[in-house]
Image (spheres, rainbow, N blue to C red):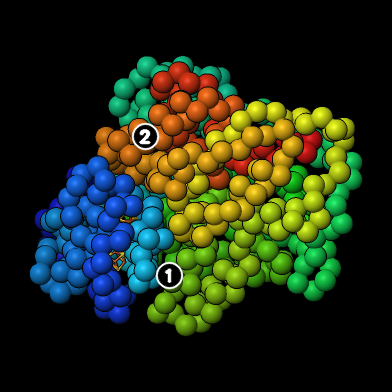
């Protein structure tokens, strides 16, 4: 939520959702274990910009002691939503869910709300987004984004750098036919060859089709069969993070129905933020038992692509491909964990296991791998200065490390880290781990 969007409007003018459930807020025992892991507290050294301070504000707002348009909106707005505090919390406080509900209570001027909805529609509404992404791909393909992004200041320059960072590092991937033999097919829940449906997503579909292609080829190489989930839509996470919970639930209902029709073993996701969104669907329907049950069933089938690959490589080893004995890729990889994979889904070891199994690659985790890069969805556009301060130590690690590739499994992280490298003229590609797997197996 941009600070400028929060106003001192009377809540009576605006339809606010009901209060945050007391049992969720009261789980916090104020121990403070979460404080030192919080990037915004680390930079600002202000209790209200720590998880514990933000939880105090949520409690005060629920009790009617603070105005949701005042300090509450400022400090909740500065939160990255990285959920590092959840990993550190011994009491199991569901901070991510509380944050979404708290943001839904920040009153926003109608004009700011319209602007926010319009912006999200441009990225997520298929009828509008296809034009947004077509223009973006055209700008990207002619090299304008990188060239102008390096020199232009402000939001225009930042948007161009983010776009430049989406350019495929490997061009178009190898043809699926390059895989000459697949491992014994992965088994589904009924003992047959496992089937999966891929979450298309919005930004992933528009700007990261090359990652989807790499995902499909690697899953084919380990013997999985794809079934198409037609009529699926954006996962809703961008709306939920912005506090637009009704819109997020509408998208979730649509996806639950679309994936129920596929009857596949797994719903595979190659975007950490979207995977965390799908796995959060049950919490979004806490007050709707029928949808909650269906959301639970969907969440049980969700896997990040690296979870499937790690499990299958552990079971069957690398697929036999037409590469001979010498590795196709050789070099050093710096791995940076996306917050919504590491903290949001608890998927921590699998991406590393998959990358380390590839011949020819020397894989290290960045020292700050478990800390947010500052991208955080739309956050880096709403809070550019604070986001850049969060990112700075990680960029320094990348530049000191002399890596051949940086690998991270979330589009927002690829874009924001990549944008920082574009700005500094550093050519190190930032890629999804599955792109390296795809290349190594080609
Ligand atoms: S670690 Fe958990 S219980 Fe402790 S202050 Fe933070 S949120 Fe509250
Ligand atoms: S989600 Fe991240 S930025 Fe927000 S309070 Fe938790 S650790 Fe801090």
Q: Nearer the viewer, mark 2 or mark 1?
A: 2
| Whether label 2 touches label 1, CB < 8 Å | no
Residue topped by disc 2: 393
Which quarter is ligand 1 in? Answer: bottom left
Question: What residue is at 32 percent from the left and 66 percent from the top?
Answer: 98
Helix, strand or loop status at disc 2: helix
Judged left or right of residue 211, residue 272 is left
Which image quarter: residue 226?
bottom right
Q: Nearer the viewer, residue 177 or 43?
A: 43
Question: What residue is at 74 percent from the left and 56 percent from the top?
Answer: 314
Where is residue 332? Give x, y as percent. 61, 30
Question: What residue is at 29 percent from the left and 41 percent from the top?
Answer: 382
Residue 390 visible? The answer is: yes
Q: Earlier in the sequence, mark 2 or mark 1?
A: 1
Helix, strand or loop status at disc 1: helix
- Calculate the distance from the C-alpha at mark 2 to the C-alpha at mark 1: 34 Å
Residue topped by disc 1: 284
Q: Nearer the viewer, residue 27 or 193?
A: 27
Instruction: Say whether mark 2 is within 8 Å of ligand 2.
Output: no
Where is residue 235? Give x, y as percent. 51, 57
Residue 332: which disc? none
Where is residue 411? Give x, y as percent. 51, 42
Q: Is residue 207 above or below residue 15?
A: above
Question: What residue is at 82 percent from the left and 47 percent from the top?
Answer: 319
């Amino acid at each position: 939520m941009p600070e400028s969007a929060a106003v001192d409007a009377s809540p009576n003018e605006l339809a606010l959702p009901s209060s945050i459930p007391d049992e969720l807020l009261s789980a916090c025992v104020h121990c403070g274990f979460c404080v030192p892991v919080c990037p915004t507290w680390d930079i600002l050294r202000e209790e209200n910009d720590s998880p514990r301070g933000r939880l105090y504000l949520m409690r005060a707002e629920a009790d009617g002691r603070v105005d949701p348009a005042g300090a509450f909106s400022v400090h909740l707005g500065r939160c990255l939503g990285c959920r590092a505090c959840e990993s550190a919390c011994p009491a199991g406080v569901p901070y991510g869910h509380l944050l979404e509900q708290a943001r839904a209570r920040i009153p926003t001027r109608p004009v700011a709300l319209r602007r926010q909805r319009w912006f999200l529609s441009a990225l997520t509404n298929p009828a509008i987004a296809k034009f947004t992404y077509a223009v973006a791909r055209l700008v990207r393909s002619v090299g304008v984004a990188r060239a102008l992004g390096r020199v232009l200041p402000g939001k225009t320059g930042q948007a161009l750098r983010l776009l430049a960072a989406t350019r495929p590092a490997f061009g178009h991937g190898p043809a699926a036919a390059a895989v000459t033999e697949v491992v014994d097919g992965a088994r589904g829940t009924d003992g047959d060859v496992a089937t999966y449906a891929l979450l298309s997503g919005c930004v992933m579909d528009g700007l990261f089709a090359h990652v989807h292609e790499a995902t499909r080829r690697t899953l084919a190489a380990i013997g999985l069969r794809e079934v198409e989930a037609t009529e699926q839509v954006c996962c809703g996470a961008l709306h939920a993070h912005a506090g637009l919970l009704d819109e997020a639930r509408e998208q979730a209902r649509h996806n639950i129905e679309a994936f129920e029709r596929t009857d596949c073993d797994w719903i595979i996701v190659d975007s950490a933020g979207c995977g965390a969104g799908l796995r959060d669907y049950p919490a979004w329907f806490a007050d709707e038992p029928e949808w909650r049950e269906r959301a639970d069933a969907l969440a049980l089938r969700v896997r990040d692509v690296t979870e499937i690959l790690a499990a299958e490589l552990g079971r069957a080893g690398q697929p036999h491909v037409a590469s001979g004995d010498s590795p196709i890729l050789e070099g050093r990889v710096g791995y940076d964990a996306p917050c919504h994979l590491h903290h949001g889904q608890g998927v921590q070891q699998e991406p590393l296991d998959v990358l380390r199994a590839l011949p020819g690659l020397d894989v290290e985790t960045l020292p700050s791998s478990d800390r947010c890069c500052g991208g955080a969805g739309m956050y880096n556009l709403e809070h550019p200065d604070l986001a850049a301060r969060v990112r700075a130590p990680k960029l320094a690690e990348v530049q000191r490390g002399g890596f051949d590739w940086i690998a991270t499994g979330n589009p927002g992280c690829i874009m924001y880290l990549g944008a920082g490298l574009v700005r500094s003229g550093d050519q190190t590609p930032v890629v999804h781990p599955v792109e390296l797997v795809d290349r190594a197996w080609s």
